[in-house]
């Protein structure tokens, strides 16, 4: 269990994380369903608040993530942390994971068979965490929900998907390669609080999330940490620390899109 606690960034989740969630994390950590399990150092199940209203879904772990078993801890992770800070959040307020849970060697694109094999894990994460808003980071993640569309056209516009909002944005790594995309990504992040606010009033709060949300009211302004879930120490990475970028080089799609 201690290992699970480390890998899912678990300390404050003990109070609220279900045994189903814990089992899922353990299953991912010990998964051998595809060949990526043989080359990985650690699986990267995901981390954050298991009752989060916002779930971020990236593509796949890079070298840093593989080493530590945590998502988005390299240069792209620093961008993500900074974007969260812009809207007054940190990674303990949200849930962060990837389409696939193990690093593809040499940062190649995940293969369709690997995506297919790993997809049930993500589906179960979505079901258990039950986020109101799913933020897809980059084209691979967006493609899970809306295949065949380009991220450059879709970004920044919320969609309905199975009763949730899916909100596509550029991959944070895109801003490292093209700094002109940084204000675009920031503009999209600034829409997130109102998406949560817009979604809450019509809904009865989730029963399992109530203890963590006691004393909060739905808001159309920027949500507090408490509104978005449990409030606890952030173990996020230090934005001032230099990061490797080799693990996060985005790949070009057949449609010529980088992210
Ligand atoms: N790190 C991740 O965990 N996922 C990505 O998509 C990129 C970097």
Image (cartoon, rainbow, N blue to C red):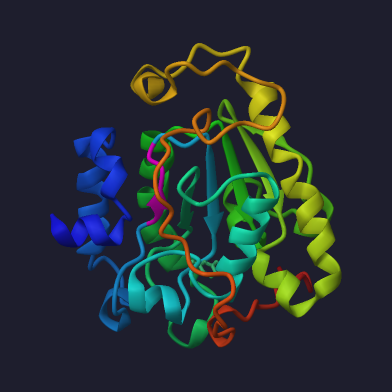
Main secondary structure of the magenta stretch: loop
The structure residue drawn at horizontal position 26% and vertical position 52%, both measured from the top left corner, is 25
- In the shown orientation, is residue 105 left or right of residue 250? left
The structure residue drawn at horizontal position 30% and vertical position 42%, both measured from the top left corner, is 13
The structure residue drawn at horizontal position 27% and vertical position 49%, both measured from the top left corner, is 11
Residue situated in front as seen by the camera: 81 or 253: 81
| Residue 258 seen in the figure | no
Q: What x and y, as percent, mark residue 71?
A: 44, 64
Numbered disc total: 0
Q: What x and y, as percent, mark residue 130?
A: 44, 32
Q: Quadrant of the N terminus?
A: bottom left
- In the shown orientation, is residue 101 left or right of residue 192? left
Quarter holding residue 79: bottom right
Q: What x and y, as percent, mark residue 135?
A: 61, 46
Quarter holding residue 88: top right
The structure residue drawn at horizontal position 70% and vertical position 23%, both measured from the top left corner, is 198
Location of residue 199 with respect to 252 vertically, above or below: above
Q: What x and y, as percent, mark residue 28?
A: 27, 58
- In the shown orientation, is residue 42 left or right of residue 225? left
Q: Which residues are magenta?
A: 46-50
Q: Is residue 213 magenta?
A: no
């Amino acid at each position: 269990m201690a290992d699970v606690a480390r890998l899912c960034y678990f300390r404050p989740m003990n109070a609220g994380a279900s045994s189903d969630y814990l089992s899922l994390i353990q299953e991912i950590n010990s998964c051998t369903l595809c060949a990526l399990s043989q080359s990985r150092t650690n699986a990267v199940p995901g981390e954050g608040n298991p009752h989060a209203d916002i779930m971020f879904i990236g593509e796949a772990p890079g070298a840093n993530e593989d080493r530590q078993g945590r998502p988005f801890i390299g240069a792209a992770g620093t961008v993500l942390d900074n974007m969260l800070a812009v809207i007054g959040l940190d990674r303990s307020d949200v849930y962060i994971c990837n389409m696939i849970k193990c690093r593809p060697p040499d940062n190649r694109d995940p293969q369709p068979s690997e995506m297919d094999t790993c997809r049930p894990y993500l589906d179960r994460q979505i079901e258990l965490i039950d986020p109101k808003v799913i933020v897809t980071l980059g084209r691979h993640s967006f493609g899970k929900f809306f295949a065949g569309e380009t991220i450059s056209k879709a970004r920044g516009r919320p969609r309905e998907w199975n009763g949730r909002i899916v909100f596509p944005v550029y991959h944070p790594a895109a801003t490292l390669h093209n700094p002109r995309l940084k204000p675009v990504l920031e503009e999209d992040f600034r829409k997130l609080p109102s998406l949560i606010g817009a979604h809450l009033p019509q809904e009865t709060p989730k029963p399992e999330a109530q203890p963590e949300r006691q004393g909060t009211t739905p808001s159309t302004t920027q949500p507090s940490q408490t509104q978005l879930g449990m409030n606890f120490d952030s173990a996020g990475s230090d934005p001032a620390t230099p990061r490797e970028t080799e693990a996060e080089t985005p790949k070009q799609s057949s449609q010529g899109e980088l992210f």
